[in-house]
Amino acid sequence: MTGNVSQKKRIWGWFFFDWASQPYNTLVLTFIFGPYISELMGDGVAAQAAWGYGVGATGILIAILAPILGAIADTSGTRMRWIWIFSVLYVLGSAGLWWTSPDNFNLLTTLVFFAIGMIGMEFATIFTNSMLPGLGRKEEIGKISGNGWAFGYVGGLFALVIMLTLFAESATTGKTFIGLSPALGLDAEAREGTRFVGPLTAIWYAVFMIPFFLWVRDPAPVKAAKGALADAMKGLGRTLRGLPQHRSLFAYLISSMSYRDALNGIYTFGGIYAAGVLEWSVVDTGIFGIIAIISGAIFAWLGGRIDMRFGPKPVITFSIVLLALTTLFITQISRDRVLFLAVDAASSLPDMAYYVVGVIVGALGGVLQSASRTMMVRQANPDRMTEAFGLYALAGKATSFLAPLAIGFTTAMTGSQQWGVAPLVALFAIGLILLIWVKPDPKSGR
């Protein structure tokens, strides 16, 4: 049921989930908290390895539960209830990151809070993504998806600017990007300004999810919950057994499993890489994030229109090729070298090169993710859309623990953060090859 809420309000309410949840990726995963952990550990290689193991372990749990939860939601018609539950986890997990004091730093506790918040974000996303087909006609879905992703990027940008200007302090000066002491009387020596990234992310989500809960309604008919789990598991079993007969969907799930994992690897380790290899501060990484997010918002919006015109498959293919080449470029950037050119330690060329990387990854990352969920709508059974997006989340997480673990292992074995990200290139290549068997629109026979 949609009640008296207009279609336009439903779409805007759905957009607000992207706005509300984006800071977990922007502030926590990539540009503020990750580099802060690297500073606390004082060793970029160790931080990248530890972050890899932590994110990887979380990914295993998400991969196991995602399709099961999606199937339950389709059977019982209770998507909104699950979004509420996982929203609570998001808020609790992100708020708990406040307790990462330099004087009492516990890596395990930090990773547990991080995992709780990440689980909340990822599972809530499964259910909100599954609502996409009901927001417009088939030919409008690409545009709606792109607009939502762009809107989310703008939300992440605003949150990052607030964090950099008012809270995140330099480890050396104790001042924010604009030369202020951390707001709200927070103690710079105890890094309370930077640690406020957790509570800010939690508050941001709680406030901006209000339009979502006011304007979005679950269109699925609500059935009695009794027997929902058994019915869901039977339905999921049938879906999994039937996947090999649906070659396009099967190939797409494995393809997206590979290339989205590679993209998430860039996001997850981009900030830690900059902190460890280029010796950037949290503030430096935050500025880099602003550039990447602006690029991402613009191109996600443009990508949605290109998707609507040409379909998602060409958009996905083009993005994967350029992202693979960009990842290779990343491995050739260090403080004393860019590609095959040796530079002075004081040179700004490595920094400029990494800013270019930020623009490219920001632009193509948003486009790729937006087009990917549009493609999933085309591939999935309309009657079991939440289950399909549960499988989509599984595809995004089944190897998501492998990429971080591979990065962590490769980094530890080689002692090099540059070579540590090399496994991502192989994942992009696998995803590109498997797209050969993906039909642009299998429901219409194409």
Image: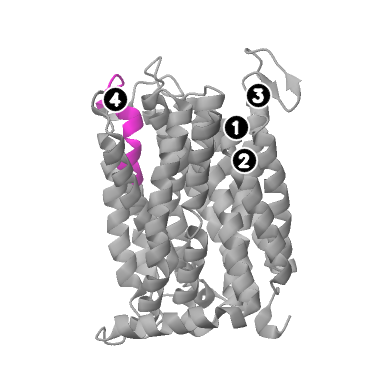
**What whole-number distance in Å separates the C-alpha atoms at marks 1 and 3?**
13 Å
Judged by depth in the image, the label closer to the viewer, 2 or 3, is: 2
Residue located 28% across and 64% down the image = 85
Q: Secondary structure at mark 1?
A: helix
Closer to the camera in the image, 250 or 297: 250
Quarter assignment of residue 28: top left
Tell me if 265 is positioned left or right of 349 in this view: left
Answer with mark 1 or mark 3, whichever residue precedes in sequence: 3
In front of the other: label 1 or label 3? 1
Q: Residue 2: within the magenta?
A: no
Identity of the amino acid at label 1? Answer: Gln
Q: Is residue 293 above or below residue 383?
A: above
Q: Which residues are magenta?
A: 185-201
Which residue is labeled 4 in the image? 102
Measuring 35% from the left and 45% from the top, which residue is drawn there? 201
N-term-proximal mark, 4 vs 2 = 4
**CA distance separating discs 4 and 2:** 31 Å
Q: Which mark is residue 418?
A: 1
Q: Is residue 304 visible?
A: yes
Q: Which residue is mark 2?
A: 422
The residue type indicated by label 3 comes to Pro
Label 3 residue SS:
helix
Contact? badges 1 and 2 (CB < 8 Å): yes
Circle on res. 315: none
- Determine the secondary structure under disc 4: helix
The kind of residue on which mark 2 rests is Ala
In this view, the residue farthest toward the front is 413
